[in-house]
Amino acid sequence: MSPSAVCGSTANDHFNDDLSLSIVGLGVEYPPFSIGPEALETLAERYYPPSMALKKVLSINRYTGIEARAAIGNIDHPLVNQPTAPSITQLNEYFQEEGVRLSVNACKKAIAEWGGNVEEITHVVSTTCTDSSNPGFDHFVARELGLNNSVEKVLLHGIGCSGGMAALRTAANLALGSTFRRKPARVLVLACEISSLLVRSELDSVDKDQTVRVGVCLFSDCASAAVLSNGIDHSSFEKPIYELLGWKHEVLLNTEKDLGFDVDPLGWKVVLTPRVPSLTSTAVAPSFQDLIKSLPRLHNDGKPPIAADFDWALHPGGATIITGVEQSMNLTADHLRASYEIYMNHGNSSSATIMSVMNRLRQMGEGREHVVACAFGPGIVIEMMVLKRSRPIDELPQESLD
């Protein structure tokens, strides 16, 4: 794909040298269960007859590179052992309990690291693609956390795996609006997904349509959160983890049918075509170049940095997506070490994954000073952000290193 195939280029944008935007708290909450590749085979044998499509899916499942996926329950969970796949009503009811619980725990971790009071939270930006309700799940999370009734909430929808990055971008723009008004902003950013309970719905489609559906081999459960500060009324306890230097959002034209998450009476159905790895890996370079052009503070005597000068917090959408970006950007596995580790140990938790990768990256030693965070979502959309590390590893709270 050529750069001209990207819609909405922001190549002429320039970010100020000091936005005064910092992530001051991060929290990740995985559910208690961890399921290996054999779990999918067990469920398939319990409820579906052998077929060529199912055989192919199970073969792919053994070679995804994922050793374990975080899940809200084990293979004997009642909702995945009914005579039929759980309905969207059942999934919503479950998310309102367990999704909210995961979210509250992730938020409490982020708020605890920040060190402030919940009454200082001015905005909440949330996202999920595995629940749809009115009021949204963020309403109940805010209530459980004891946030002010006047806190401004935004719930993002329709953005899938790019949701965590889109939520951070939205939070940054809200915080800058507060800066313009000379008001403090402490934005709670939240992403939560419960994907594991969709396994029966996905296997139903494999059996009925005799199609190979890769998504059933990849997705997992997680909630992640961050507190973003605009630095106004800064307190001594507030220590930046990552500074936000700039960001970029683009749509890849004519790719709407390649990546999606479609509503269905039995939840949601993953849309993931074989073109996605090549589409995404090809799109990263022009997006990176445009973003770096907008950040002259990173240039050395007019020469922009290259991709290998950064650590990369890439959303681990799949093994071929990670390796595709690694090869196209001339990176090494070390540049992407946090993405590989999260993918291998927890799987792809959709929108909640990127903040988990960012959290893990800061725990893995000193690393490179600057970080590129990147994720892809339905559209296909690419979200990219440049961060600067701010806190030495020895200053991290001990519990975050576990």
Image (spheres, grey):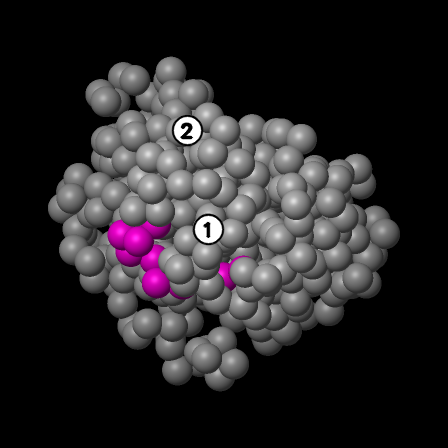
Q: Can residue 247 be seen in this view?
A: no
Q: Quadrant of residue 388?
A: bottom left
Residue sitting nearer the eye, 135 or 60? 60
Other residues around mark 1 within 10 Å, as few (<14) / some (14–19) / many (≥20): few
Q: Which residue, given by chain and number where applicable, does mark 2 sit on?
A: 210
Q: Is mark 2 on a helix, strand or loop?
A: loop
Q: In which quarter of the image is residue 14?
A: top left
- Residue plotted at (33% across, 21% down): 6
Residue sitting nearer the eye, 194 or 339? 194
- Residue plotted at (49% across, 42% down): 48
Residue sitting nearer the eye, 165 or 326? 326
- Residue plotted at (38% across, 72% down): 363
Expressed as whole percent of the image width and height from the top left, the position of residue 105 reads 65, 67
In the image, residue 61 above or below residue 248: below
Mark nearest the camera among 2 and 1 is 1
- Residue plotted at (58% across, 58% down): 223
Q: Decide if residue 207 is on the left or right side of residue 96.
A: left
Q: In which quarter of the image is residue 181?
A: top right
Please give the label number shown on residue 115: none
If you read the primary sequence from the N terminus, does the residue marked by circle 2 or circle 1 appear first? 1
Whether residue 132 appears in magenta in the rendering, the answer is no
- Amino acid at dot 1: Glu
Q: Which stretch did the figure color magenta?
A: 61-71
3D distance between C-alphas at marks 2 and 1: 16 Å
- Amino acid at dot 2: Gln
Expressed as whole percent of the image width and height from the top left, the position of residue 161 reads 47, 41
Whether residue 62 appears in magenta in the rendering, the answer is yes
Q: Which residue, given by chain and number where applicable, does mark 1 sit on?
A: 45
Q: Decide if residue 161 is on the left or right side of residue 285.
A: right
Q: Is mark 1 on a helix, strand or loop?
A: helix
